[in-house]
Image (cartoon, rainbow, N blue to C red):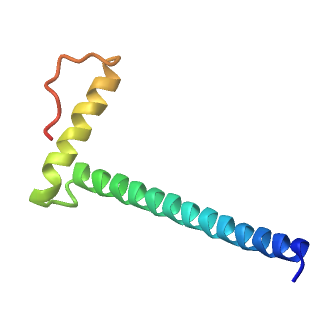
Amino acid sequence: MGFLDKAKAAADQATTRVKEGVDDVQAKHSLSQAYDQLGQTAYELIEKGELTHAGLSAQAEEIRVLREQIADGGTTDAPPPPA
């Protein structure tokens, strides 16, 4: 195998690895969007009273506080959300 053949093979392998990396990043982004949408839906159901769970209460309250801060123009009079 000549030098150019080796270089081409290495370039092909690198291209394959980059494509796999892009696919992985896209899949992770899609997963993140799906989690975000699930969270939004869960929050809406909590606010409607259609979903209740003790483990969701703190996160829902944090969202309420943040939404109020945004609605008030970003004032920070409210206590920081729980960790």
Closer-to-camera residue (4/47)? 4
Among the 4 quarters of the image, the one containing residue 26: bottom right
Is the N terminus in the top left, top right, bottom left or bottom right quadrant? bottom right
Q: Position of residue 64 (x, y in %)?
A: 23, 37
Q: Quadrant of the C terminus?
A: top left
Q: Is residue 21 above or below residue 73?
A: below
Provide residue 66's location: percent of width, then percent of height: 27, 32
Depth check, front residue: 66 or 24: 24
Which image quadrant is residue 53 in?
A: bottom left
Q: Is residue 29 above or below residue 59?
A: below
- The quarter of the picture where residue 39 lies is bottom left
Residue depicted at 83% across the width and 69% down the height: 7
Left/right placement of residue 30 relative to residue 20 reads left
Q: Is residue 83 above or below residue 39?
A: above
User: Camera-side residue: 38 or 51?
Assistant: 38
Which residue is pictured at 46% across the width and 63% down the height? Answer: 31
Residue placed at 36% from the left, 52% from the top?
40
Residue that sits furthest to the left in the current view: 54
